[in-house]
Image (cartoon, coloured by chain):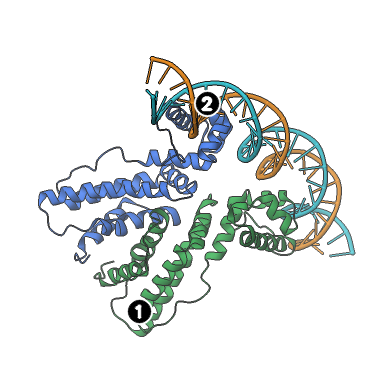
Chain colours: A green, B blue, C cyan, D orange
DNA sequence: CCACTAACGCAAGTGATTAGCTTTTACGGC
DNA sequence: GCCGTAAAAGCTAATCACTTGCGTTAGTGG
């Protein structure tokens, strides 16, 4: 549901979508985020502006789609032998990627052009899936005191994202570790 | 720092700002958020569009300023006799207001037209100030086990905002209460 | 292979945004 | 209180993003 309806998943529609997304990525790298405009993207993608307007509505919704793609995790969380180590490592990497200049821009874009909240939900689902992988691995090891997925989302993921969005200063990997410790040391009550 | 530089705090500048902000609020109530446009706001405010463009840059930054104003708390947290009750009541009200249709719209607007993060930081500061009031009152009562302000921000405010922004479904006052219980039942370690 | 229709291309029209210049008006020193 | 200065607003014209209607192309399903 990234682009509006997409009643025709294959053929020309797919080619246009790929071409437009590629054009956005290229132009963003070349001229920067501010210089992006629908006619410019259309020209690079080899389509007419009206095509983009009809499928995406406006530049923000298009950027939101591209941003969500880029926020998709490309690797599984690394295995460090224990839940605590896995979660700490994942949280640090998550914070690093999300709090980078590029990460912040993608998060903003993803939230921005997202009338129904579908793209934002996708971002949350990505993080939840990564957390599930870590927790499942811990379960497979037979570890004790494994927190609920929602506990990790509430007390690790949410604080990181909140600070990135609302308090753009002073984020460190130590903070991510601290959040993980806090989440794990709670008595499992939920 | 709401409007860009504001080198001249008084006189005409202030009148224009007030007039423009009022025009945004009025038109939003009359014709709805979608119908808002810079020339329209300018006409209602009795200024020329170029004035708005020069001072705010674009409609999003203007709406961001207005949204932050509307997100400012207008009342102190009520006194219910104990930290636990005060925090639970405040969190419930906070969730209610922020997760309403209007609240979501203001949050989005505030984040949207906010290049430097100043307006988002202001929103966070509002919440932090409210939390501080609750915690200070508990201290004045001589209560034990008062959490740090940052603990409440991380484990109550952040999860609420995260869910509002990224998971637009299934928010209840029970969830706010649950977060408060969790934050208070942790052993004070930070 | 053919009919159907969603999606694209094209082009004209609308209106938001920008830019250059002039005019107003707040602020600071006398 | 009265100027000098410069910031901020008014004005206008030009540009460009965006919309819209219609003809064409090309997947899709029979």
- Which residue occupies the foreground of this view, A89 or A128? A89
Task: Please tell me whether residue A103 is drawn above or below residue A142 in the rendered image.
Answer: above
Circle on res. B132: none
What residue do we see at 43% from left, 43% from top?
Answer: B106
Q: Position of residue B36 (x, y in %)?
A: 54, 35
Q: Position of residue B73 (x, y in %)?
A: 31, 41
Q: Which residue is mark 1?
A: A85
Q: Which residue is mark 2?
A: B44
Quadrant of the image containing the N terminus of chain B: top left
Location of residue A177 by image quarter:
bottom left
Q: In terms of secondary structure, where does tag 2 sit?
A: helix
Q: Are marks 2 and 1 on the same chain?
A: no
Q: Position of residue C8 (x, y in %)?
A: 75, 54
Calculate the distance from the C-alpha at mark 2 to the C-alpha at mark 1.
59 Å
What residue do we see at 46% from left, 44% from top?
Answer: B105
**Do the numbered discs 2 and 1 sit on residues whose CB atoms are within 8 Å?**
no
Quadrant of the image containing the C terminus of chain B: bottom left
- Which residue occupies the foreground of this view, B118 or A1? B118
- Which residue occupies the foreground of this view, B125 or A161? B125
Tell me: B45 left or right of A3.
left
Residue B75 visible? The answer is yes
Tell me: B94 left or right of A111.
left
Tell me: A133 left or right of B176.
right
Q: In terms of secondary structure, where does tag 1 sit?
A: helix
């Amino acid at each position: 549901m990234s682009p509006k309806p997409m009643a025709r998943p294959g053929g020309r529609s797919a080619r246009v979508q790929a071409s437009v997304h590629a054009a956005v990525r290229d132009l963003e790298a070349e001229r920067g985020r501010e210089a992006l405009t629908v006619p410019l993207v259309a020209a690079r993608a080899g389509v007419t502006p009206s095509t983009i307007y009809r499928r995406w509505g406006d530049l923000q919704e298009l950027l939101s789609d591209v941003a969500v793609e880029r926020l998709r995790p490309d690797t599984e969380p690394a295995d460090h032998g224990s839940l605590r180590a896995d979660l700490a490592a994942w949280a640090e990497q998550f914070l690093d990627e999300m709090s980078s200049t590029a990460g912040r821009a993608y998060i903003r874009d993803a939230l921005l052009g997202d009338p129904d909240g579908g793209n934002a939900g996708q971002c949350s689902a990505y993080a939840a899936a990564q957390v599930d992988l870590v927790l499942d691995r811990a379960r497979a090891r037979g570890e004790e005191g494994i927190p609920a997925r929602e506990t990790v989302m509430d007390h690790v993921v949410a604080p990181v994202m909140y600070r990135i969005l609302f308090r753009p200063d002073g984020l460190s990997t130590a903070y991510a570790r601290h959040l993980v410790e806090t989440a794990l040391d709670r008595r499992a009550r939920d």
